[in-house]
Image (cartoon, rainbow, N blue to C red):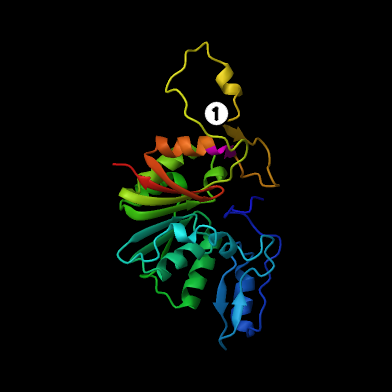
Amino acid sequence: MQPNARGDSPTSTEPHGSATPGVASQIHALGPWFHNLDLRAEDGTLVQTAPNHFLGDFPSSFWHFFRDAIPQDLTGWSVLDIGCNGGFYSFEMKRRGATRVLGVDHDARYLRQAEFARANLGYTEREVEFRQVEAYEIDRLLPERFDLVIFMGVLYHLKHPLFALEKVASLVKEDGLMLFQTMERGSGESRAWEEDYPISEREVFFDDAFPRMYFVEHRYAGDPTNWWIPNPAATQAMLRTVGMQVQARPCVEVYVCRRQA
């Protein structure tokens, strides 16, 4: 399991805290949770949804590394969170004042978790909306465009990653931002490459810095949905190909991109 994957199940997700049985039992019934969220019981005490998460306080501990890469004030912004899971990033964007927040996921169980958390946190459906959408249909089902699109922990779970990434990029407004993350493996080297090579050129493909996508036929980290794992050069090349310009790489595997005109 990759520490920044967002679509996989934790090993242990029993809620804890001094909560009264109502909220705690509902959290348990909706589990297992991959997002460890801080919710409130009826008596006001804190209860976490995944306190024994194998990645610790995830995704809050991961968010810490790149939270400053996104504007603190999102007033007037529209945000799309793809692969929203339990809603952690959707709620964070709303806390920053985003006017429109839409979280989508293909997994109905995660959406039930997100809706429960939304109610517990005091948000209305109008303030933070959740919807079930498949990645390959997202551009057809969502005719609007967004100031910020969050696409994290999803790409490597898709059999057709570039096809999906192109659709996702089309949902970013011109000059808008994408917060992107994917599992990466292989060399971290990066360099400029020629735009074309003769068919006789073979050596370039043996260079560790050349863009590569590793195909996982069976499983990686015990997960049969880990299909494609790029090296950093391939990640950046794919982002450029779909019209996204990398503005920053605040931590390993995370990119802040701007939609090119």
Q: Nearer the viewer, residue 43 or 136?
A: 43
Give the residue drawn at x 61%, y 71%. 49
Q: Is residue 55 magenta?
A: no
Q: Is residue 187 left or right of residue 91?
A: right
Residue 255 screen position, x and y as percent: 48, 48
User: Does 133 sit above or below residue 162?
Assistant: below
**Where in the figure is residue 121, as x and y percent of width and height?**
48, 76
Q: Would you name the residue on which mark 1 appears? A: 210
Front residue of 73 and 144: 73
Confirm whether residue 124 shows in the render.
yes
Q: Which residues are magenta?
A: 228-232
Identified at 33% across, 54% down, the residue is 146
Q: 125 left or right of 187?
A: left
Residue 194, compared with residue 10, is above or below; it is: above
Counting every numbered tag in the picture gives: 1
- 231 is within the stretch colored magenta: yes
Q: Is residue 48 above or below residue 185?
A: below
- Residue at the far top: name it: 200
Q: Residue at x 55, y 76 (%)?
A: 39
Specify the principal SS of the magenta part: strand
Q: Residues within 10 Å of mark 1 (few under 14, many from 20)?
A: some
Asked whether residue 87 appears in the rendered view, the answer is no
Q: Quadrant of residue 195?
A: top left
What kind of element bears circle 1?
Answer: loop
Task: In the rendered view, tell whether residue 19 sits above or below residue 3.
Answer: below
Q: In the image shown, does 139 or 94 lie closer to the viewer?
A: 94
The amino acid on which the numbered mark 1 sits, given as a three-letter code, is Phe
Residue 112 x %, y %: 52, 66
Judge from the rendering whether residue 209 lies leftward or rightward of residue 17; answer left or right.
Answer: left
Front residue (pair 70, 122): 70
Q: Estimate the x, y position of residue 165 in percent, counting from the top left.
A: 44, 42
